Image: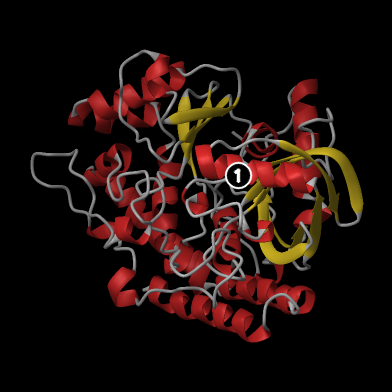
């Protein structure tokens, strides 16, 4: 895969908001098709829309009746339907784009009476017009978040990229629909296009919120409700084989052979990252938020991050359905709701499958959620193994220094907040922006310990 486990040695002058260039992460093209994919990666990674030092604009012009019907259908049946819209992005007009609701827990309270500018959406420019794109980008996710500014997720995504892990690019955006405008964070959608430009995986599987990493036999139909294939030719064989190994292998085999099934270095970094940015809603959080990417060349799976809107201890409480409202980030008291360090997860004697500690009140904060809120078989077994646990601990210290010891995280916060004050001061009060930025920087000292 194109994203590799590595550390970027950067001076603070090179750390800019929203985009840390992963120099050297892309393998050289070996044939014409690979060269085309690399060109796509270059196009999307350098797209001016992802310049997060400024606030961008997306305006959606959609038939009022079609929009109302879409919301009424979701409210009555839970179905998410595509409708056609005209979308204007930073002044460029795209006819025949697709618009659909996006999310699970973030949509639980959505009704047909809600302001559409505050609801999570996915925009797909090529849904009804083949090949239509904006600077190489075909899909935009208008994120739900736990604050007006979405600073916590924006900063976490930049840090994810700084860690050398696959990350979605993001942009602060003035989002307009049905005559209403709100400040929203817009990110890449981890689908076919994103996989081509970022991972180059053979197959990409999204873990559904109501599923888990359990092995359910060799019938692909048993997995249709817990994993959704987002990229590659439809084939669940690699996924099923991987789930069988992590669930059914004995402890000795798991320890000796996991590296033949999983990129263990990237997984150690992934687990460490979740704790370093205080994100309980991850692979074993209530939303079961993750992707599994399979590389046929190496035969390895990689756990890919998704959904960081609760990073830095943010809580979804007190915010509208789309996260466009609220009084700044709802940051819990560090002593009450901070995610416990996985370094405390000692392996119980004689049981290498024991669950890692559950984060306090995780299920309550998410209103139940769909996942198990503190138990994932892969994370539990990985951390129960002495050698893998040591690898995780090493990554934990390295990321703390990379993010907080270097001052990189503070610089990222400053750049994002400066952009919001300049480009969205009429949508979000400057005091709210400053308060969210201050909450973040205050959390850095705690997380660096």
Q: What residue is at 75 percent from the left and 65 percent from the top?
A: 181
The quadrant the N terminus occupies is top right
Q: Residue 69's spot in the image, x, y percent?
A: 67, 42
Residue 149, by quadrant, is: bottom right
**In this figure, what is the number of numbered marks?**
1
The quadrant the C terminus occupies is bottom left
Residue picked out by circle 1: 72
Mark 1 nearby-residue class (10 Å; few <14, some 14–19, many ≥20): some
Q: What residue is at 46 percent from the left and 50 percent from the top?
A: 105
Q: Residue 235's spot in the image, x, y percent?
A: 52, 16
Give the residue furthest to the bottom.
431
Q: Residue 106's spot in the image, x, y percent?
A: 51, 53
Tell me the SS state at disc 1.
helix
Q: Is residue 17 left or right of residue 257?
A: right
Q: Is residue 400 left or right of residue 18?
A: left
Residue 256 vertical placement versus 372 (above, below)? above
């Amino acid at each position: 895969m194109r994203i590799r486990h590595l550390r970027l040695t950067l001076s603070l002058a090179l750390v800019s908001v929203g985009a840390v260039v992963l120099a050297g992460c892309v393998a050289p093209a070996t044939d014409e098709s690979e060269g085309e994919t690399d060109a796509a990666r270059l196009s999307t990674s350098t797209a001016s829309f992802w310049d997060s030092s400024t606030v961008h604009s997306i305006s959606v012009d959609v038939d009022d009746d079609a929009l109302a019907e879409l919301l009424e259908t979701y409210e009555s049946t839970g179905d998410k339907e595509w409708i056609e819209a005209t979308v204007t992005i930073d002044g460029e007009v795209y006819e025949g784009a697709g618009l659909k609701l996006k999310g699970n827990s973030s949509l639980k309270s959505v009704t047909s009476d809600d302001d559409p500018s505050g609801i999570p959406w996915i925009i797909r420019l090529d849904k009804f017009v083949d090949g239509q794109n904006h600077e190489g980008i075909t899909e935009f996710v208008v994120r739900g978040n736990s604050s007006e500014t979405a600073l916590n997720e924006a900063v976490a995504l930049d840090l994810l990229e700084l860690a050398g892990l696959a990350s979605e690019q993001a942009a602060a955006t003035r989002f307009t629909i049905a005559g209403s405008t709100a400040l929203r964070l817009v990110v890449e959608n981890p689908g076919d296009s994103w996989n081509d430009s970022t991972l180059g995986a053979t197959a990409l599987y999204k873990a559904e919120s109501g599923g888990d990493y359990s092995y359910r036999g060799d019938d692909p139909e048993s997995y249709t409700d817990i994993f959704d294939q987002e990229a590659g030719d439809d084939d669940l064989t690699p996924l099923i084989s991987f789930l069988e190994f992590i669930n059914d292998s004995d402890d000795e085999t798991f320890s000796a052979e996991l590296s033949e099934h999983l990129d263990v270095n990237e997984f150690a970094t992934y687990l460490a990252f979740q704790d370093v940015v205080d994100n309980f809603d991850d692979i074993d959080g209530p939303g079961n938020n993750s992707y599994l990417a399979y590389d046929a060349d190496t035969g390895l799976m990689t756990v890919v991050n998704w959904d960081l809107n609760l990073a830095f201890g943010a809580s979804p409480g007190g915010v509208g359905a789309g996260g466009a409202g609220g009084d700044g980030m709802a940051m819990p008291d560090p002593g009450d709701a901070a995610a416990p360090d996985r370094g405390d997860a000692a392996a119980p004697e004689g049981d290498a499958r024991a669950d890692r500690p559950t984060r306090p009140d995780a299920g309550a904060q998410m209103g139940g959620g769909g996942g198990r809120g503190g138990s994932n078989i892969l994370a539990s077994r990985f951390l129960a193994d002495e050698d893998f646990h040591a690898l995780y601990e090493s990554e934990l210290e390295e990321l703390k220094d990379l993010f907080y010891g270097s001052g990189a995280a503070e610089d990222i916060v400053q750049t994002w907040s400066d952009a919001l004050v300049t480009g969205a001061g009429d949508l979000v009060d400057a005091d709210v922006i400053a308060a969210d930025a201050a909450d973040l920087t205050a959390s850095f000292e705690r997380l660096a310990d």
